[in-house]
Image: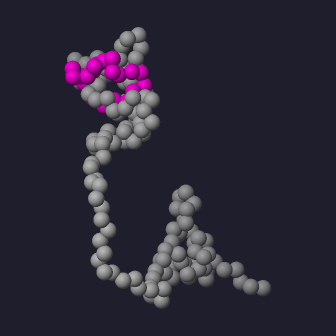
Amino acid sequence: MARVQKREGRLAVVPDHPSIKNVIKARIKNNLDEESIADGDWVVARLVRHPLKADDRAFFAQIDELVAKSDDPAVPWRVTLARHALEQECPDAGTDWPLLDEGLTREDLTATPFFTIDGEDPRYGRCPAHRTSRGRRLAPERGHCRPYRLRSRRPRR
C-alpha cells in the first residue's frame, strides 16, 4: 500500500508504513492508464528493485492497482481491504430474509445462577497481581486476593 506523488511529471510512491518515509520512484503496470492516477491516490505497488540486490542501485516500484482516489470518502475502508487482499465489493446478500417461527418458547432465567467477570469484592483492584503495566485492572480468580488482603490490612487501634 502506498500513496502516489507526482513531481515534475514523474511518478513516485510513499509506502504506508510507520517506519518507512522514503519516496520511491515508480512506474505503472502496462494495463493501467497514467492519466487515471493523480497525486495522493492510494495504490498497490510492489518493489521491483532493491539496493541490496546485485546490479540494483536504488529502490524502484511498480504500481499494480489503483485502490482509491484521494477524494474518495471510503479511503480507509478500501485501503484496509486492499491491504488484506479482500474484495472491494460486498457479496450479494439477497433480498428475501424470512423470519422462521421455530416454536421456541421463552423461559425465565432470573433464578438461574450465572457467573460474571466481576469479583465478589469491588476492592480487587488493590492487589498488584491484577494490574497491568498500563494500570488496567484484571478480574481476579475466585479467592485469589484474600491472602493479600489479610496481609496488607493495617491493625486496628
**Residue 136's spot in the image, x, y percent?**
55, 62
Quadrant of the rendering where the C terminus is positioned? bottom right
Horizontal arrangement in the rendering, residue 89 relative to residue 110 (left or right)? left
Identify which residue, 117 or 42, lies in the foreground: 42
Outermost residue, top side: 8
Q: Is residue 57 above or below residue 44?
A: above
Residue 51 lies in quadrant: top left
Horizontal arrangement in the rendering, residue 3 relative to residue 118 (left or right)? left
Outermost residue, bottom side: 111
Q: Is residue 19 above or below residue 49?
A: below
Q: Residue at x 37, y 42 (%)?
A: 80
**Residue 10's spot in the image, x, y percent?**
36, 13
Identify which residue, 12 or 147, lies in the foreground: 12
Q: Residue at x 59, y 70 (%)?
A: 125
Identify which residue, 143 or 75, lies in the foreground: 75
Identify which residue, 18 or 94, lies in the foreground: 94
The magenta-colored residue range is 27-49
**Residue 39's spot in the image, x, y percent?**
42, 21
Q: Would residue 30 be counted in the magenta stretch?
A: yes
Residue 127 lies in quadrant: bottom right
**Residue 118's spot in the image, x, y percent?**
53, 75
Q: Residue at x 33, y 21 (%)?
A: 36
